[in-house]
Image: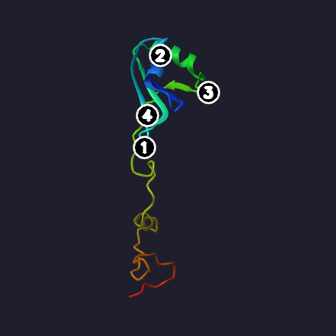
Amino acid sequence: MEIFVSNLPHSAESGEIETLFASFGKVDKIKILKDKFSGKPRGMAFVAMSEDADAKGAIESLNGFMMQGRAIKVEKARSRTSKSGGFNGFRPKTSFDFDAERNGKKRFFKNSPKGRGFLKDGQKKVP
């Protein structure tokens, strides 16, 4: 089972985390998350334990444990969700979406400052 540990002290090393979790069972793997630009630890880690019962015991016992003056948060790791698009799944409306909302009529005019725009109701198209 994968365990997510957050609010770790930035000076925490994998050996310290392993000894902390090894008292509850066998630790298979530890991955400390690091900043991609500076390479410094971000205060989060993933711990993989082979037995689910040992992992659940570690989660219950170590959640809120004080490590170097910080109360760590320990929980079961959630699976990653896929994101579609760039804006966290939100796709902003384009001019074509607005055009479709106006009953399918093309209401663009050419001589706007940006080269495209909408005709207001009652406005005539500039040649």
In the rendered structure, the answer to whether residue 1 lies left or right of residue 5 reads left
The amino acid type of the residue labelled 2 equals Thr
Q: Given contact means CB atoms under 8 Å apart, are the residues at marks 1 and 2 in contact?
A: no
Residue at image x 46%, y 26%? 13
Q: Which residue is mark 3?
A: 69
What secondary structure is found at the residue carrying circle 2?
helix
How crowded pointer 2 is (Cα within 10 Å; few <14, some 14-19, many 20+) is rated as few
Which of the 4 quarters of the picture holds residue 29? top left
- In percent of width and height, residue 6 lies at 52, 30
- In percent of width and height, residue 61 lies at 57, 16
Q: Which residue is mark 2?
A: 19
Q: Which residue is mark 1?
A: 38
The amino acid type of the residue labelled 1 equals Ser
Among the two numbered marks 4 and 1 on one chain, the one whose residue lies closer to the N terminus: 4
Q: Which residue is mark 4?
A: 33
In the rendered structure, the answer to whether residue 61 lies left or right of residue 28 reads right
Residue at image x 44%, y 48%? 89
The amino acid type of the residue labelled 4 equals Leu
- In percent of width and height, residue 81 lies at 42, 37
